[in-house]
Amino acid sequence: TQSGSSNNQVSKLSVTITPTSTASYVKQHGLLVMGDISTPGIPLNQVSIFTVRADGTGKTMLTGPGNQYPSWTPDGKIIFVSNRSGSPQIWTMDEDGSNPQQIGNLNLNGQITRVQMAKNGLIAFLHSGDGIWLMQRDGSGLTELVKFENGAGDAPSLALSGTWLTYTAPAAATRSEE
């Protein structure tokens, strides 16, 4: 499968995830895209994005600091969060780090994380732990899908089809869904 399981197996390759790095899924040819925090305690605005093969070889730095939360798009690009335009925004870039493109212009206060894109161009992301938001590939249609009270919710996972989404929330958490 292309999505990870609780034992971090992805596409029949075993991946070790350390506390200072996060891995998205393995692209068909075995390449991970990751955000790297080289030293514990480093602010996330100093995180860079790189690719590496599942066996740990071939590490290639794609961005400088201020870029984080990368994941593969269905068409082989990388979608990520960057502050390169002055505030946290969602961007895409080619597999080699070239051709960065900002998607829309989000006017949200707080942190954007867990960004991902479905085949139909739908983008889902978590905003400061207070809700899950959706928008289209061109930045239009920004909608808060799920609002978490007191930041009690996490880990949105958008189906590749873009027709459903899962997330975690404490059973007692108050939430509203549209």
Image: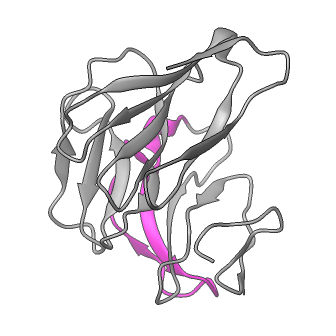
Residue in the image at 37% along x and 68% along y:
74
Q: Which residue is at the front of the view, 2 or 15?
A: 2
- Magenta highlight on residue 53: yes
State the residue at coordinates (50%, 37%).
113
Residue 90 percent coordinates (x, y):
30, 41
Q: Is residue 54 left or right of residue 161?
A: right
Q: Does any portion of residue 106 appear in the rendered image?
A: yes
The residue closer to the viewer here, 3 or 108, is 3
Q: What color scheme is it?
A: one colour
Residue 63's spot in the image, x, y percent? 32, 58
Instruction: Report x, y in % for residue 23.
Output: 59, 63
| Image position of 82 (left or right of 173) | left
The residue segment tinted magenta is 43-68
Residue 70 location in percent, x, y?
A: 44, 55
The answer to which of 91 and 73 lies nearer the viewer is 73
Q: Is residue 65 visible?
A: no
Residue beneath the point at 52% across and 56% down: 159
Where on the picture, by quarter, is residue 153? top right
